[in-house]
Structure formats: C-alpha cells, structure tokens
Image (tube, rainbow, N blue to C red):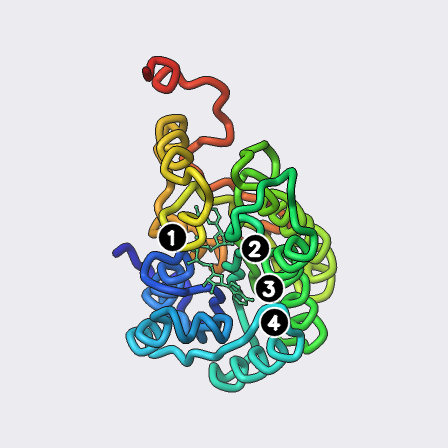
C-alpha cells in the first residue's frame, strides 16, 4: 500500500463503509494509513447487515450509527466525532447511494414517485443536509475538505442507471452551491469524484452491471479506476496538496469521460 503521511494529524468522518467491497472501506483504510484519525458511520440497518464493526476495530476508529436522512442523527454524529477525535474535522467523505426504484425493478418510464423522493433524499439531499449541519455547527476546521462520490450518468445517458442519474446530477450541483458558501466562510473545499464502475453492493445492484463494467474497461485508455485508486485520489483531495481545488466534479475513470470512439471497442464482435 502506498502511504506518505499525507494526512498526519488530520481528523475525518467517513460515511458508507458497508463491507470490504465498499469504496468507503478503502478510503477509510487509506486515510488511516496516511496518518489520519477517523470515525466511521453508516445507517442503523447497515450496522446489522454489514461488517463495519470489523473495520472499526482494525483501524481503531469509533463506529457511530446515523441515518443520513435525519438532521438530528447527523448533528449527534458530528458532535460525537469532534469529541472523540479531539477537535474540528479536516475532512468528510459522503459515500452513500441507494435507489428504491432500481432495487424494486421499476423502469425509468414507470417510476414510483414516492420511492423516487426517498432515493433523492438518501442519495443526494443527504449531502446538502450533512453540509448544512457541518456549516451551522461550525464542525469543520479552516481549510477542510468535503467529498462525495458520483457517476458520469449525471452528464450522459446510461439508461439502466435510472433515477440515480438524476440523484447524482443533484448531488454534483450541491457541491458547487455549498462549495461557494463553505469557501467564503472557512476556506473549506467541496468536490465530487466521478468514479469508474466498481464492483460493490450498490454498484452491482444496477441492471447489467457486468456489461457496464466491461464496456467502460474497454473504452478507457487506462481501464477502470479501482476502489484502491479512488481511495488514494480521495486522500490527495483531503490533503494540503489540493487546497485550491473546489466546486469541481473530478473524473476518476481512466480517461473514459473524454473518449468518443475507441477502436478497441469497435473491433469487438
Ligand atoms: P456500497 O453499497 O458499499 O455503499 C453505499 C452505502 O450507502 C452503504 O454503506 C449503505 O449502507 C449507505 N447508505 C444507504 N442508505 C443510507 C442512509 N440512509 N444513511 C447512511 N448511509 C446509507 O457501494 P459503493 O459502490 O461503495 O457506493 C459508494 C458511493 O459510490 C455511492 O454514492 C455510489 O453511488 C458511488 N459510486 C459507485 C460506483 C460503483 O460502480 N460502485 C461508481 C460511481 C460512484
């Protein structure tokens, strides 16, 4: 594992580590290897079905349950984290996504709007809610860094990604809008990372994921970016080496987003 003490002395909160395949699992591991102290959080239901407690033990990190759709639970989470870590937060990762319509097999042209509301609440509004709590309680340190994970379906059509495409478009917009306010107030950076398809619980829930994955792998000159590579990119964005990067959607996809035609894909049967 590459490690350079990039985050020595920094404090952070990592959302969304469910099991070993989760992108957040890798980010948490990388951040601690880089010298950070962190707390881990996930929804109460994930505490029962996932293996986050094992990660907490391995990284010596307190695990605090919080539903990202509850302002009250988020307030308690950040309050406890500042307490446990011994000061304001230098970085926060939002790595949360869930689509009720995709999970229940509803197609995009036959959406259940109650479920869509919930999808947007969990996958996008939770990012605004989280930042609002951090902003209002002054829990971020000056010059801190906030990141959320997103996918290119926010800009281009991937039909099976369904309502999650709209959730991601909203999520990316929140990074720009809140990035302005957080920048002016405390020099805090807010960005989204647009990650390649990655084999995780959320990723594999998308219909035709294997085709998605292999298409992107063939299109991208560097191939798909792995979860470990994403974790290293996150660490760099939490570090002091990226202090002037904010309000950006940053593609971490092996070059996929800049490709038009790749002869390697055309020549496939
Ligand atoms: P994952 O299934 O491991 O992570 C999703 C997490 O969201 C889980 O830990 C889950 O417990 C959490 N979550 C769901 N509802 C919640 C709630 N109400 N409160 C708090 N947490 C809640 O899957 P993965 O792939 O690691 O997903 C992480 C992020 O990366 C998501 O935003 C996803 O959309 C994004 N992403 C994933 C890609 C992929 O191909 N796997 C590609 C690009 C972005």
Residue labelled with disc 1: 200
**Mark before the other along the chain sequence, 2 or 4:** 2
Q: Does the CB distance between marks 2 and 1 fall below 8 Å?
A: no
Residue at mark 2 to residue at mark 4: CA–CA distance: 32 Å
Q: Dot 2: within a 10 Å radius of its alpha carbon, few (fewer than 14), some, or many (20 or more) residues?
A: many
**Mark before the other along the chain sequence, 2 or 3:** 2
| Disc 4 CB within 8 Å of nearest ligand 1 atom | no
| Disc 3 CB within 8 Å of nearest ligand 1 atom | no
Q: Does the CB distance between marks 3 and 1 fall below 8 Å?
A: no
- Identify the residue at image location x=46%, y=17%: 261
- Identify the residue at image location x=53%, y=61%: 94
Element on which disc 3 rests: strand
**Mark before the other along the chain sequence, 1 or 4:** 4
Q: Where does the N terminus fall, quadrant-wise?
A: bottom left
Q: Closer to the camera: disc 2 or disc 4?
A: 2
Residue labelled with disc 2: 100
| Disc 1 CB within 8 Å of nearest ligand 1 atom | yes
**Mark before the other along the chain sequence, 2 or 1:** 2
**Mark before the other along the chain sequence, 3 or 1:** 3
Q: Closer to the camera: disc 2 or disc 1?
A: 2
Residue labelled with disc 3: 143
Residue at mark 3 to residue at mark 1: CA–CA distance: 31 Å
Is residue 34 left or right of 139 when viewed as pictured? left
Element on which disc 2 rests: helix
Q: Could you say which quadrant of the image residue 35 lies in?
A: bottom left
Nearer-the-camera pick, 211 or 64: 211
Residue at mark 1 to residue at mark 4: CA–CA distance: 29 Å
Image location (x, y in percent) of residue 169: 64, 45
Residue at mark 2 to residue at mark 3: CA–CA distance: 36 Å
């Amino acid at each position: 594992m590459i490690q350079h003490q990039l985050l020595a002395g920094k404090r952070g909160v990592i959302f969304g580590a469910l099991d070993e395949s989760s992108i957040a699992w890798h980010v948490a591991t990388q951040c601690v290897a880089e010298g950070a102290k962190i707390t881990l959080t996930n929804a109460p239901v994930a505490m029962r079905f996932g293996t986050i407690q094992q990660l907490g033990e391995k990284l010596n990190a307190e695990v605090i349950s919080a539903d990202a759709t509850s302002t009250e639970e988020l307030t308690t989470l950040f309050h406890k984290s500042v307490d446990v870590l011994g000061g304001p937060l230098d970085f926060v990762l939002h790595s949360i996504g869930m689509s009720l319509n995709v999970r229940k097999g509803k197609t995009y042209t036959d959406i259940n709007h109650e479920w869509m509301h919930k999808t947007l609440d969990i996958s996008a509004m939770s990012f605004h809610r989280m930042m609002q709590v951090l902003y209002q309680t002054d829990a971020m340190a000056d010059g801190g860094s906030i990141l959320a994970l997103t996918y290119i379906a926010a800009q281009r059509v991937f039909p099976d990604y369904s309502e999650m495409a709209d959730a991601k478009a909203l999520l990316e917009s929140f990074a720009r809008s809140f990035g302005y306010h957080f920048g002016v107030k405390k020099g805090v950076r807010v960005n989204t990372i647009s990650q390649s398809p990655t084999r995780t619980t959320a990723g594999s829930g998308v219909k035709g994921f294997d085709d998605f994955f292999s298409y992107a792998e063939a299109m991208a000159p560097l191939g798909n970016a792995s979860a470990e590579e994403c974790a290293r990119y996150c660490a760099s964005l939490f570090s002091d080496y990226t202090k002037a990067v904010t309000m950006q959607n940053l593609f971490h996809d092996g070059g996929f987003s800049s490709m038009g035609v790749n002869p390697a894909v055309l020549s496939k049967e």
